[in-house]
Amino acid sequence: MTKIMSNRKTVGLISDTHGQLSQAAVEALQGVDLILHAGDVGDNKVLAALGSIAPVEAVRGNMDYGLWAEQLPPATMINIKQSYFFLIHDKDKIDLDLSTIGVRAVIFGHTHSSSIEKIDTIWYINPGSATHPRYGQNPSVGLITVYEKQMDARIIEI
């Protein structure tokens, strides 16, 4: 029997759910290997529902309160296929020189507006808000496909 090893990992990105998780968001995240929630979760039930799709890493946003939210870190580093992803709710709160620690991408939320931008060697990806978008945008999530030496990121309107 031959074991087939995947050379990629698909990561779902979501933020600013504020206690709601639409069926469209659930469908868009089906089949991912990992979900990163960039804060303002709103309710632990959202994390439980996402956890039924794939393992979840989440950070606390400025609107996350209560005992369940206190268990979430304000920021975390995740190693995916030998690349470091920095997960935080508000990118303006980053107080580290990410380039010196080898961060490949910053995943953040807070603005309720989706964006993908590369600054120097670091990608900054905001999946937007899955429930309360701003600036005329539609609700959205993000997907990153991580390979050994590259990654592809995209925003999916839901």
Image (cartoon, grey):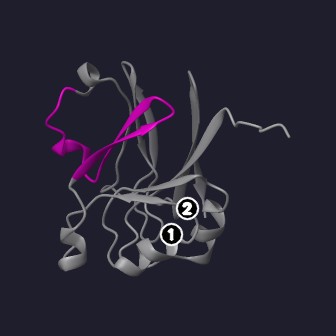
Q: Depth check: 62 or 60 in front? A: 60
**Residue position for label 2:** 54
How far across and down, in percent of the image, does residue 30 sit? 65, 62
Please check the rendered image and state whether residue 138 is part of the magenta-colored stretch, yes or no: no
Image-quadrant location for residue 77: top left
Any part of residue 148 in sight:
yes
Q: CA distance from mark 1 to mark 2?
A: 7 Å
Three-letter code, disc 1: Leu
Q: Which residues are magenta?
A: 75-97
In screen coordinates, is 55 left or right of 26? left
In screen coordinates, is 118 left or right of 27? left
Query: Answer yes or no: do the residues labelled 1 and 2 have beta carbons within 8 Å?
Result: yes
Image-quadrant location for residue 79: top left
Query: Which residue is farthest front?
Result: 1
Q: Please tell me whether mark 2 sits on a helix, a strand or a loop.
A: loop
Q: Residue at x 43, y 64 (%)?
A: 133
How far across and down, in percent of the image, does residue 1 sit? 86, 40
The quarter in which the C terminus is drawn is: bottom right
**Residue position for label 1:** 50
Please check the rendered image and state whether residue 78 is part of the magenta-colored stretch, yes or no: yes
Three-letter code, disc 2: Ala
In screen coordinates, is 132 left or right of 71? right
Q: Depth check: 82 or 28 in front? A: 82
Image-quadrant location for residue 9: top right
How far across and down, in percent of the image, does residue 135 sit? 41, 58
Q: Residue at x 35, y 74 (%)?
A: 18
Q: Residue at x 51, y 33 (%)?
A: 81
Q: Please tell me whether mark 1 sits on a helix, a strand or a loop.
A: helix
